[in-house]
Image: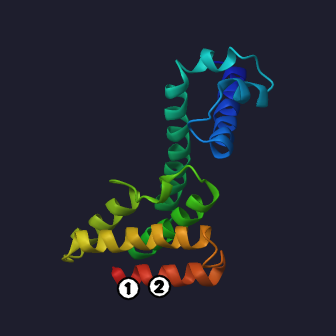
Amino acid sequence: MDEITIDLREKLLTAGIDEILYNGVSGFSLRRVAAACGASCAAPYKHFKNKDEFIKEIISFVEGKWLLLAKQICDAVKEPKRRITELCVANVRFRITNALYGNGLPEEEGVIARNIREYCKEFCIEDVEIRVFAVQSLVCGTAALIKNGLYENTPETFNNLRQSVLNEL
């Protein structure tokens, strides 16, 4: 694919995110997505087989952004406990700014859970799945509390999250 094709594909995906946020999956319109990009009605079909594939690609696109961020954190932070806490903080922030990510659900077998399992194995810590559950609950719960306005998106809230995660590890 040439650069123009890649740029249009990314524009379509980004416009698709907005379309889902404003109209939901049931009201999703490929015509509106194309119009938002200044493209023809046929443009989405040049990149995606159909509406369902396009929606799946949108979800993969958002998840890919999270995985890239998580990799950067894992590469930069070598100390396991700090790496896990920073992944948790980043995940909450990502959930807040990317409404399509997670829908309030924890990563299935994601970066945070894998890092907790590796940490517990390395340091012979028991109750691994309870720790994974507790940390994932903290992440999902904190994101929901901030999104719902019950807690503020402040450094204090994220420091509380860091301390809570450390307590669970």
Q: Is residue 16 left or right of residue 127?
A: right
Query: In the rendering, at what x and y percent does residue 53 appear?
Result: 49, 26
Q: Nearer the viewer, residue 6 or 150?
A: 150
Q: CA distance from mark 2 to mark 1?
A: 6 Å
Q: Is residue 37 above or below residue 119?
A: above
Marks 2,1: beta carbons within 8 A: yes
Q: Is residue 36 above or below residue 47?
A: below
Point 46% across, 73% down: residue: 85
- Please count the marks in the image: 2
- Quadrant of the rendered structure where residue 26 is? top right
Few, some or many C-alpha atoms within 10 Å of disc 1 (few <14, some 14-19, many ≥20)?
few
Q: Does residue 79 show up?
A: no
Residue closest to the far right? 38
Mark 2: amino acid: Gln
Point 43% across, 74% down: residue: 138
- Quadrant of the rendered structure where residue 23 is? top right
Point 51% across, 44% down: residue: 64
Q: Quadrant of the C terminus?
A: bottom left
Query: In the rendering, at what x and y percent does residue 134 appear?
Result: 34, 74
Mark 1: amino acid: Asn
Q: Is residue 156 above or below residue 74?
A: below
Q: Is residue 22 left or right of residue 117?
A: right
Helix, strand or loop status at disc 2: helix
Residue closest to the far front? 26
Query: In the rendering, at what x and y percent does residue 117 appear?
Result: 27, 65
Q: Is residue 130 left or right of residue 142?
A: left
Which residue is the site of mark 2?
Answer: 163
Q: Nearer the viewer, residue 92 or 18?
A: 18
Which residue is the site of mark 1?
Answer: 167
Few, some or many C-alpha atoms within 10 Å of disc 2 (few <14, some 14-19, many ≥20)?
few
Q: Quadrant of the N terminus?
A: top right
